[in-house]
Image (cartoon, rainbow, N blue to C red):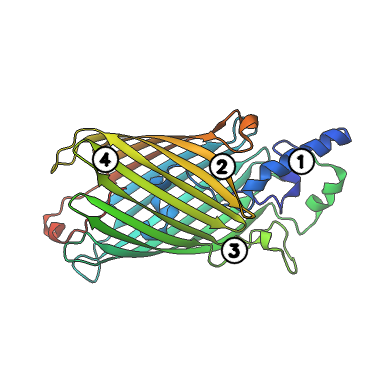
């Protein structure tokens, strides 16, 4: 989760508030205000869209061609002119092969997100478990509908002792109702649809809704008529993409994502591509992909460019390595020297060879 600076006015700046001249204080407040604008009440987001599928949509739990999947992601952001964000996401999910129909399946998973922001070390820990059901829509198990739900706990913590505050902020910290840590129960749900296109191609679309119960995450207790900013904003995610072998050399993996949370909207559109000779019937042992995405945002009816995301992906046997980098093209580009943040992800699959179930194994899409 991104920190909600409307609830944390005294941490809106990237540096502690110190007793300096009025001009310096005003300039610092303005800098902090403009930096915080795109971050209010937002969840974390990853640059390469499907590097953490269960973070994108609970219905993606268990949607892969193996028995177990382990994923690790790390992202740094805004480190060029502040202490920035450091985000880690880890997840594991599996198929239980226990659906009602021969081609149906059940997926279960667990996910943990850790995020730290700024000099005051605003920390967020999100741990959740997910459950999905894959309903086959054809007899071969290649066309199906998936529905999933995820529940968990979100904890936010603030190190207020690291702040050097102006006197007008002391009552806020000294208030007996101020809490340095807050936890909230969270529930989310989603659906996804996958359909084959020819022998080797497929397309997929999905939608998810996060924070359905709008958990309370304010740092002040015993509030009456707390403002909306003290509660998690619901987040809507619409995503989709496909896998297309254009010919025996060119392969494309286009994808898109639309995020809507509170007053903020974000759009990502782009594709991986590979130029590598591929046998028509045999899956290659390794594949090298290059990709690029454009990310922009919308707020108050205005569209704003945000970043160009460049990615390199290497698929080797049952492991996928991806490195991405945001090239900042927003209004903060000069302050950041056009730098955004690097991101690394590793996805590893494990498949148990069980001849008795190969006949009924679900054929999932390749992301």
* Element assignment for label 2: strand
Residue receiving disc 1: 30
**Numbered circle sitting on residue 305:** 2
Q: Are marks 4 and 1 in contact (CB under 8 Å)?
A: no
Label 2 and label 4: CA atoms lie apart by 28 Å
Q: Name the residue under label 3.
A: 215
Q: Which of marks 2 and 4 is nearer the N terminus?
A: 4
Q: Judging from the image, what secondary structure is the residue with disc 1 in?
A: helix
Classed neighbour count for the residue bearing mark 2: other residues with Cα under 10 Å, few (<14), some (14–19), many (≥20): some
Q: Earlier in the sequence, mark 2 or mark 1?
A: 1
Could you tell me residue 64's position as x and y percent? 28, 52
Whether residue 350 is situated above or below residue 344 in the rendered picture: below
Q: Is mark 4 on a helix, strand or loop?
A: strand
Disc marking residue 163: none
x, y (%) of residue 354? 15, 54
Where is residue 300 shown, x and y percent of the image? 64, 55
Q: In which quarter of the image is residue 234?
A: bottom right
């Amino acid at each position: 989760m991104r920190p909600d600076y409307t609830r944390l006015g005294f941490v809106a700046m990237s540096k502690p508030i110190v007793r300096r001249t009025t001009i310096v204080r005003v300039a610092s407040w303005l800098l902090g205000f403009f930096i915080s604008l795109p971050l209010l009440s937002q969840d974390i987001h990853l640059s390469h869209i499907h590097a953490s599928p269960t973070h994108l949509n609970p219905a993606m739990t268990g949607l892969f061609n193996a028995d177990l999947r382990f994923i690790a992601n790390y992202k740094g952001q805004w480190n060029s002119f502040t202490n920035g964000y450091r985000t880690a996401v880890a997840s594991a999910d599996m198929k239980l092969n226990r659906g009602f129909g021969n081609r149906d399946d059940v997926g279960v998973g667990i996910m943990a997100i850790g995020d730290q922001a700024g000099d005051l070390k605003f920390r967020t820990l999100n741990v959740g478990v997910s459950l999905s059901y894959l309903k086959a829509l054809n007899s071969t198990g290649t066309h199906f509908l998936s529905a999933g739900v995820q529940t968990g706990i979100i904890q936010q913590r603030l190190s207020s002792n690291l702040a050097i505050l102006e006197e007008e902020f002391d009552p806020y910290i000294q208030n007996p109702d101020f809490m340095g840590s807050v936890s909230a129960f969270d529930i989310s749900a989603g659906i996804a649809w996958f359909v084959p296109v020819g022998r080797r191609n497929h397309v997929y679309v999905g939608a998810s809704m996060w924070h359905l119960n709008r958990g309370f995450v304010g740092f002040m207790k015993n509030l009456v008529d707390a403002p909306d900013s003290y509660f998690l904003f619901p987040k809507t995610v619409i995503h989709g993409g496909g896998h297309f072998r254009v010919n025996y050399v060119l392969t494309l993996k286009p994808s898109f994502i639309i995020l809507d949370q509170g007053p903020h909207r974000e759009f990502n559109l782009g594709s991986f591509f590979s130029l590598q000779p591929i046998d028509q019937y045999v899956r290659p042992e390794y594949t090298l992909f290059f990709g690029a995405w454009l990310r922009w945002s919308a707020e108050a009816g205005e569209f704003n460019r945000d970043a160009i995301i460049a990615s390199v992906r290497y698929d080797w046997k049952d492991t996928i390595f991806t490195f991405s980098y945001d090239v900042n093209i927003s209004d903060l580009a000069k302050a950041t020297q056009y730098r955004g943040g690097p991101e690394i992800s590793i996805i590893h699959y494990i498949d148990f060879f069980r001849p008795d179930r190969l006949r009924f194994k679900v054929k999932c899409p390749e992301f």
